[in-house]
Amino acid sequence: MLELGAELESHDLDKQPLSEQELNELIGARDYRLFLNPRNELYRRRKMAETPPSKAEAVRLMSRAPNLIKRPVVVRDDQVVLGLDEAAYRKLLH
């Protein structure tokens, strides 16, 4: 995003994990499964692709294991982009 000319405020999820309330606010009405990182060991070990946890369980797990959250998470107003998606970043800026 920086190369696109956007200024970002960074939040290190490893040092300052999001609470369950913050995650619920971030996810809102979006599909919570999109926030799960399929490369994460816990995701693979629990076979979340085949058997996704409930939203409440996913939020609980993400609040305790921040690496389970797909990154980067870019938020602008009420829009959220997950992962490395340059086209979505460009759309977010316009």
Image (spheres, rainbow, N blue to C red):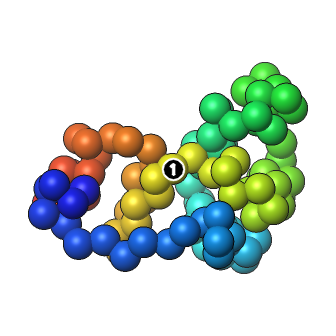
Q: Nearer the viewer, residue 22 or 3?
A: 3
Q: Residue at x 19, y 50 (%)?
A: 90
Quadrant occupied by the N terminus: bottom left
In this view, 1 is above or below 13? above
> Residue 2: image x %, image y %?
21, 60
In this picture, residue 90 sits left or right of residue 24: left
Viewer-closest of 9 and 94: 9
Quarter location, residue 3: bottom left
Seen at 80% across and 38% down, the residue is: 42
46 in relation to 50, above or below: below
Whether residue 4 appears in this view of the structure is yes
Residue 31 appears in view: no
Question: Badge 1: few (under 14), some or many (20 or more) residues near its Cα, within 10 Å?
Answer: some
Q: Is residue 7 left or right of residue 54?
A: left
Residue 23 vertical placement versus 4 (above, below): below
Q: Secondary structure at mark 1?
A: loop
Quadrant of the frame with the C terminus: bottom left
Residue 87 occupies quadrant: top left
Residue 92 is left or right of residue 63, and the answer is left
State the residue position of label 1. Answer: 71
Find residue 20 and report its horizontal and vertical position in percent.
76, 71
**Which residue lies at the image location 47% right of the left edge and 57% below the top edge?**
73
Name the residue at the front extreme. 15
Residue type pointed to by label 1: Arg
Where does residue 48 sit, x and y in percent of width and height? Answer: 78, 32
How many numbered marks are there? 1
Residue placed at 26% from the left, 42% from the top? Answer: 86
In which image quadrant can residue 26 be found?
Answer: bottom right
